[in-house]
Image (cartoon, grey):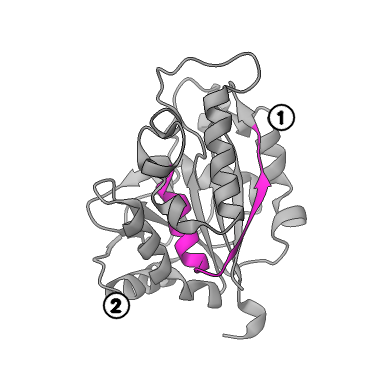
Amino acid sequence: MGAEDMLRETFFISHGNPIMLVDESMPARHFYEGWKEKVLSKRPKSILVVSSHWCTSVPTVTAGDHPDIMHDFVDCPASMYQLKYPVSGAPDVAKRVQELLTSSGFKCELDMKYGFDHGTWVPLFLMYPEADIPVCQLSIQLEKDATYHYNLGRALAPLKDEGVLIIGSGVAVRPSDDTPHFFGGVAPWATEFDDWVEETLISGRYEDVIHYQTNAPNCNLAQPEPDHFYQLHVALGAAGQNSNAELVHRSWDHGTLSYASYKFTST
């Protein structure tokens, strides 16, 4: 593997509401559309996405040649259920993921049939519309904690040297569905949590982010469940302890859902 193939960056992105596929007014849509020009100009050889919508008892990675995409969303325009993202799978990367994880003490299973959920294909649809970069998807383990997922990311770090783009796809602030929308801008509790995450990451206090459930303000409101936040810890772990964090996008939906997204660059 030549130096020209190596990547130094990992990412945590907020995939948010899939309606961005048809709603051109959403700032997050424009962020993803400008990905190759403004965020990561280097073309990866393949992509590994850690999705918030696939939870298993042990790490599991898609290993099919052509996984189907899932239209796993509701109350969306009919046209969205007709959209396709005909990207190929990355079985070789999946096997490499299994090798790296098992050698680090994790269990890891390959799944030949599972497809790509909207946490994976919706942002990629806008980021890489040509659908010409092979993709595989990795699950999370809800019964585990953030430290576990950080260490999972550390085990995956060698993939960067092999040209694999590691993306954690979650949501930076994601309250429960029964939390009222805030129509006067952004809810103060959401801003406080989002700002804390940014300041803590930028200042390199990664240990505080790993223990966000006891350190972050308003955590019970902003991230009542960890399923959309552990992806940040995987991306952080894969970047390494001496990486630099950068906020690459922030926008809001209904005053309570944050699309904050981060780049972690290994030094």
Please indicate whether residue 143 sits to the left or right of residue 222 in the image: left
Amino acid identity at mark 2: Ser
Where is residue 48 drawn, in percent x and y? Answer: 48, 60
Q: Nearer the viewer, residue 103 or 232?
A: 232
Q: Nearer the viewer, residue 243 or 74?
A: 243
Residue, x 57% and y 22% (percent of image)? 187
10 Å crowding of disc 1: few (<14), some (14-19), many (20+): few
Where is residue 181 drawn, in percent x and y? Answer: 53, 16
Q: Which residues are magenta?
A: 229-251
Image quarter in which the N terminus is found: bottom right
Does any portion of residue 173 appear in the rendered image? yes
* Image disc number at residue 256: none
Residue occupying the far right of the picture: 37
Q: Nearer the viewer, residue 177 or 242?
A: 242
Please indicate whether residue 23 sits to the left or right of residue 190 in the image: right
Residue, x 53% and y 55% (percent of image)? 87
Residue 195: say if magenta: no
Residue labelled with disc 1: 24
Please indicate whether residue 145 sits to the left or right of residue 166 in the image: left
* Image disc number at residue 103: 2
Q: Rounded to the nearest whole Å, what is the CA distance between mark 2 and mark 1?
A: 44 Å
Nearer the camera: disc 2 or disc 1 = 2
Image quarter in which the C terminus is found: bottom right
Circle 2 — which element? helix
Circle 1 — which element? loop
Where is residue 11 drawn, in percent x and y? Answer: 56, 56
Residue 232: say if magenta: yes
Please indicate whether residue 253 sits to the left or right of residue 177 in the image: right
Above or below residue 186? Residue 4 is below
Above or below residue 234? Residue 115 is above
